Amino acid sequence: MTPVTERLRRLAVLLLAVTATGASLAAGEDQEARHWLDRVAYAASRLSYDGTFVYRNGDSIESMRIIHRAGAGGSKARLVSLIGEAREVIRDNERVTCYLPGSSSVRVGKPRPRPADGYNVFKPRGDFSDHYALMLANGERVAGRDTRLVSVAPRDEWRYGYRLFVDEETGFLLKSELVDGHGGVLEQIVFTRLELPDVIPDALLQPGVSGEGFTWSTSGAVPGVSRDSRWTVGWLPAGFSMSDRAADAAGAGRMPVEHLVYTDGLASVSVFIEYLDAQGEHLEGLSRMGAVNAYGTMVAGFQVTAVGEVPGGTVERIGRSVARR
Amino acid sequence: MKDDALHESLSALVDGELTRAQAEQVMDAVLRDPALREQWRRHHLISAVLSGHSGPSPGADELAVRVAAGLAAEPASLATHRAPRRRRAWVPLALAASLTAVAVAAGLMLIDVRDAGVAPRPVRATIAGDAASPAPARVAAVTAPAGAERTRMTWNDARPAVEARLNGYLLDHNEYLAGGVRGMLPYARVVGYDARD
């Protein structure tokens, strides 16, 4: 263990000790921290902004620009890579479009239906505090703005922690870290610039590439399609329950896919079930991309994959528990 | 001084690991060589931005691009974190005025993260350049590895069919992240993904 990780480990142990002894004291702080999380969710959907951030996932570092326009008619956002191939994602109420110029492809998905009032609320479940400890502190300055630090520490090994640096003035999330059980940062987003203009011109929300001559594909699953699932998930970490279910739209070009979503109020795990013919290459075991873990297994000719920003052990145990009725 | 040795020394200087005499020698070399100066600047920017102490950012988008691009261009000797050594007391750094300006702009502070103990302590940076009035150096905690060698973001399963399926799943999964606390940010994983064209 390097001295750096050793120090982080000690810090994590210290934080845990503080959490344990200050449980009753923390009740008020817990409420206030929840208020801040709600502010963050509100700001993310209600503010119009144009910002630049550095994104680190494992050893990979990218810089990106994000432009978001909030409005009565729904919001529209564009996220574009500033280095190398200009990959981008554009999201509005109708679709999520992902442009990948390097492979001359475009992928279109259906957005999850948003609440009628157009913004998300942080909705902790009743037992949220059984699974996470919340702490508030003064944060460092990020992109020249003062922040509050909301630390969200998991109480078991099934989920990750978060360190959220929130703009004091607006509630905007200026810096976000996903932290493992040893205090190691798995994924990090740090804004270097944030502007909050009154008007975001249409031009800024247009893709930089036309998509002309690209291969277009669509996601198979359509949110909100209700269909009795023939699949059951036998194990979930305490506090997790189903939040969404999406099912295949016939003729979408992929084999039927079922998409089940489970959440504890903060972390989410998706379980995908897809028919795969015998020749198809399938995932058996764990795969990882920075903070995201996936576990795949074959059940009765179907590829079952659990995906989420949770530890590998969590997606593995969930994935192994999936069975056909 | 040979190039490799210089890179190593530059890195040690940034980490506050040199004696005053050594530091001055390296700074002389840095002042003579524009390429080294650029490396020095990148090294600090990367540390500062990742640790969130970049302060009011000098060049908006430009800064983020320079940081990420800087990492990509970073020579291995600088980019790879050197083996930790058991270390001694704080070493004052003699910074020439031209470099002071850069350090102040980036809001830099050097902190020895490898020193034992829980709370990081700041290194006192002695500004002894030839400027008429040396500006006080604001300092930034270096909590992130200053330059892990850049690798592209991919699933660790290289089979194209599996990779494509996982990417599709990831895109769909992002739509359902709970709470909306992080808004569009999860899509950074999609944008940052190396499509391995």
Image (cartoon, rainbow, N blue to C red):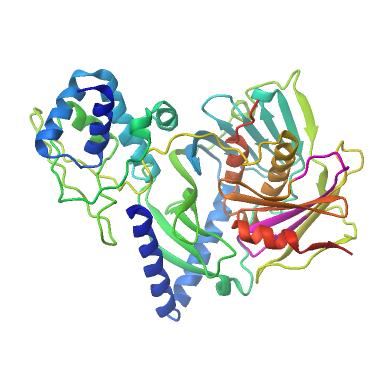
In the rendered image, the quadrant that contains the N terminus of chain B is top left
Place residue A18 in its image quadrant.
bottom left
In the rendered image, the quadrant that contains the C terminus of chain B is top right
Residue A86, how many percent across, how many down? 59, 26
Give the residue at x 53% y 60%: A37
Left-right relation of A291 to B75: right
Tell me if I can see residue A230 in this picture: yes
Residue B151, how many percent across, how many down? 51, 34
Left-right relation of B1 to A325: left
Give the residue at x 74% y 46%: A283
Question: In the rendered structure, does residue B191 fall within the stretch colored magenta?
Answer: no
Q: Is residue A54 above or below residue A183?
A: above
Residue B126, how many percent across, how many down? 12, 41
Residue A217, how many percent across, how many down? 79, 32
Relative depth, front residue between A142 and A11: A11
Q: Is residue A265 above or below residue B196?
A: below
> Exactly how many numbered labels are in the figure?
0
Span highlighted in magenta in the image: A260-282
Place residue A245 in its image quadrant.
bottom right
Give the residue at x 18% y 23%: B29
Q: Is residue A26 above or below residue A285?
A: below
Place residue B145 in its image quadrant.
top left
Question: In the rendered structure, does residue A264 fall within the stretch colored magenta?
Answer: yes
